[in-house]
Amino acid sequence: MPGEETKVTITDGELAAKSAPLVDKLIADQVAGKLAAGDPTLWGPAAESEAAIRLSWTALHRSSRPLIGEIEALRAELHREGIDRVVLAGMGGSSLAPEVITRTEGVPLTVLDTTDPGQVADALAGDLNRTVIVVSSKSGGTVETDSHRRIFAKAFADAGIDAASRIVVVTDPGSPLAELAEAEGYRKVFLADPHVGGRYSALTAFGLVPAGLAGADVARLLDQAAGVAEKLAADGAGNPALTLAAAWGAAHADGAEKVVLADTGSGITGFADWAEQLIAESTGKQGTGLLPVAVDSPGAPGFADAGPDATPVAIGPGTDAAPVATAGPLGAQFLLWEFATAIVGRLLEINPFDQPDVEAAKQAARDLLDDPARLEGGAQPSAADGPVEIFAPAGVSTDGTLAEVLRAFLALAPEHGYLSVQAYLDRLDDASAALLRGELARRSGLQTTFGWGPRFLHSTGQYHKGGHQNGIFLQLTGAPETDLEVPGRPYTLGKLQHAQALGDGQVLTQHGRPVLRLHLTDRAAGLAHLMRAVEEVAE
């Protein structure tokens, strides 16, 4: 439970034996102490320049303390004005940590990490008189977040509300968003530490500001991290980060390049979704890496029945199915997993702080938005089955039913490959799409991930292009009931969402990976039809 000691346990004797020499080597090389001290040489000469400007996260339990008072003062000020509804516009590291923090503490936060017009419209339908929006972007140019800012600014103005007084910004110093916020006179600007990458930013302003404004106890979170910091910096066998990194490294060397994450009663809500980005984007490059597979319970397909290509990890008390278990309160777990991920980067001989393959999908989407005829015309479906249009990859016949198409598509996966289900839909109204992960995993025998698009592009998207090239990709797109204009931009949210799906599909295809896109002409009917087809796929 949240108050227990922060620790990592390896219950599998064989994995423990294979991990032990790695722990010994990490101790001998003083990796933990050097990491805590900000030594950028730990990952080799090629990574040194990037690492030199990405290691401030190791001391955030101290350096983020001044934020506490600023957040509390702004929250009190907003409440005096009757503003108590917090909307967060952010992607990847700017949204995942605040969502875990607020869900764990049970405080309300509306998170916009989507380009789905229906989901954004739902957020707009809330009481704007009580609303403040936190616009959070490290680069200051995130297209999704900028679109949300534009849409909410217009909505505030249309409602007779001074938009500038309702916009709080979190960004890096000198970013375009910081400059815009100053020019527009936005309510408050929090400048984050620029020497922390997005996926390591849970304890920076990116994680703390939206969570704190929503009512989470961010001081306690920093206290929890501080409570484990000394242990994580110690070059000794009692360091849980060394244990976790060594377990991942030893398992990977044995062919288990996937890490299956399930909560077993940690008291933390949604931690695997945060860890997914941290691990995938940090390690999935140069044809190697660890693919995190977030599942909804230890009984879910892919966890208890994991094969030799995957290591189940319990978040909370250990289980018979999990050779590795981690325990501790949320703030401590953030720091533990960040240390372990950076350290396993050294074992895998990669740079855990860059994301060289993320930009390709963004550029492909921009190219499509710049060519409306190509975006709106596009490829024609290979076939249709009821409310589902089928865009099949080479090697998949569409002469049969949707179930037969799915069966042929799944057969394209190599041995010990994986299936990635990517839903460019509304994760609230179309939440049933997430059930596909377990059903497809059960029937295919493949480790299966599920991601909401474009959210996953800021998370596992790096691994898909840069990691082990053994994935197959099922894209779900859907016709929105209504669309939303993006003020000052020549596209709607629906067109942006469509461009992001097509753009990422193009890049995956260029990498030689099979992509099957199923377009739901009616979302509710299409999802029901698809689920029935999945049920017909032989186990």
Image (cartoon, rainbow, N blue to C red):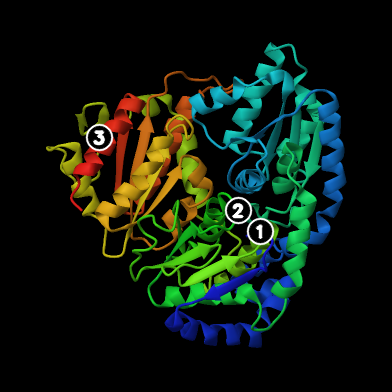
Q: Which residue is drawn at 76% across and 49% down?
A: 218
The secondary structure type at the circle numbered 2 is loop
Select label 3 or label 1 by which is in front: 1
Q: Which label is found at residue 2?
A: 1
Asked whether residue 370 is in view, the answer is no
The secondary structure type at the circle numbered 3 is strand
Gap in Å between the C-alphas at discs 3 and 1?
46 Å
Q: Residues within 10 Å of mark 1 (few under 14, many from 20)?
A: some
Q: In the rendered structure, are the residues bearing label 3 and label 1 in contact, judged by CB atoms less than 8 Å apart?
A: no
Gap in Å between the C-alphas at discs 2 and 3?
39 Å
Report x, y in % for residue 62: 82, 60
Amino acid type, label 2: Ile
First in residue order: circle 2 vs circle 1: 1
Report x, y in % for residue 206: 70, 46
First in residue order: circle 3 vs circle 1: 1
Q: Is residue 448 above or below residue 55?
A: above
Q: Is residue 247 above or below residue 55?
A: below
Q: Which label is found at residue 390?
A: 3
Q: How many marks?
A: 3
Residue in the foreground of this view, choosing between 506 and 492: 492
Q: Residues within 10 Å of mark 2 (few under 14, many from 20)?
A: many
Q: Which label is found at residue 495?
A: none
Report x, y in % for residue 462: 49, 54
First in residue order: circle 2 vs circle 3: 2
The secondary structure type at the circle numbered 1 is loop
Q: Which label is found at residue 268?
A: 2
